[in-house]
Image (spheres, rainbow, N blue to C red):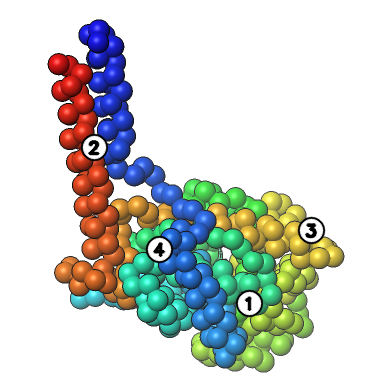
Amino acid sequence: MAAAARAAALLLLLMTIATTMMPPPAEAHLEMGAYNKTCPQAEDIVLKEMTAILGKSPDLAGPVLRLFSVDCLVGGCEGSILLDSTPGNTAEKDSPLNQGVGGYQVVDAVKAKLEAACPGVVSCADTLALAARDSVRLTKGPFIPLPTGRRDGNRSVAADVAPNSPPPGATIADIIALFATKFNLTAKDLAVLSGAHTIGRARCSTVSPRLYNFGGRSGASDPTLDANYTATLRGQCKPGDNATLVYLDPPSPATFDADYYALVAGNRGLLSTDAALLLHPATSAYVAVQANATSSDQFFADFAASFVAMSRLGVVTHHKGEIRQVCSKVNPPAAPATTSASAAAARGYYQLTTTAGLALITTLAVAHHLLM
Ligand code: HEM
């Protein structure tokens, strides 16, 4: 064989082997049905368990949906909201800003079922994402096909919460800017995702400043809140009552529908951030369209798209992070090999290196032959 042809053949072989040995791409990557091979029943298990839990306690749909948004909007959808504080570290869940956040026990229950069926396979981040997706579906909202493959991050620091949350007194322009700069989400995404407030509840401590102490003036209520609604809310949230929960969408609190927009348009948005959607053309236009829509179809399609966009924020994939065994704790350093995902990952790595090693030996043998 001519020297040039030999060299070209050798180059081709070396390129082939280099590709075989290449690590997976570093960029975050989710895919539909990421567990189809490793735990094909994963999404069914989540749906079954969520159906059982919400069948008994319908009011848990709101907390689970909110929990997912809180996870995603602080450091990404990597399950960090689920981690407990440890000596020397106050976790996100213990930030004063997350005091009203709940639903942790739902994620733990779903994760326990997943661990029983497929130990060490499905991450806590995906467990939460799928549980939130099913909270929407089981309250008569849209079914959202959701890409999976999130792994669990290990950083959960309370101090990270404030910089990623609208500051007290934030204007709608501030929130739109926060969404754009921190999350790469649009004003439309904000208007659409706020539609999640069609289910669930808020604490009186959140609502009372609009009822009794608006703008820091004692006894003043928010003039933009419908007067009859203000009176009703004052009946539910007495001064000094921080604990009582009031529905965000009282006419249909457990149904995921577009009625939220009619409430907001009628000055009955419960949260100041709901009311604020009317104060910016980019968000008020969406509220007006949905308030007058004859069906929920467009809102459902929009919500599915914005939910998936949110669900991609800051995900941890491939060899990064871990698959936590218990969602509130990072895995112990020497987890038992049979249940640990890192062991599975290590097995995968070993197989890869074995395959690559064999390929390398073959390449060298062929190269030797070519050069002879
Ligand atoms: C700028 C964005 C957002 C702000 C400022 C906001 C704010 C709030 C506040 C203050 C509450 C009441 C908390 C309490 O009083 O304990 C709440 C509840 C809730 N939020 Fe949001 N939220 C935002 C985005 C979202 C998103 C993106 C989702 C989900 C897709 C969501 C879903 C919910 C749900 C379902 C509840 C009811 C929770 C329950 O029943 O316990 N929120 N939100």
Q: Residues within 10 Å of mark 4 (few under 14, many from 20)?
A: few
Provide the secondary structure element on which disc 4 rests.
loop
Sequence-first tag of 2 and 1: 1
Relative to residue 166, is residue 124 drawn left or right? left
Residue bearing the label numbered 4: 38
Q: Is mark 4 within 8 Å of ligand 1?
A: no
> Could you tell me which secondary element the residue under label 2 belongs to?
helix
Please identify, in this view, whether the residue under mark 3 or under mark 4 is nearer the observer: 4
**If the image is split into quadrants, where does the C terminus sit?**
top left
Residue at 21 percent across and 26 percent down: it is 366
| As drawn, 352 above or below 118 | above
Q: Which residue is mark 2?
A: 359
| Circles 1 and 3 in contact, beta carbons < 8 Å | no
For marks 4 and 1, give the CA distance. Answer: 26 Å
Q: CA distance from mark 2 to mark 3?
A: 60 Å
Q: Which mark is residue 289?
A: 3
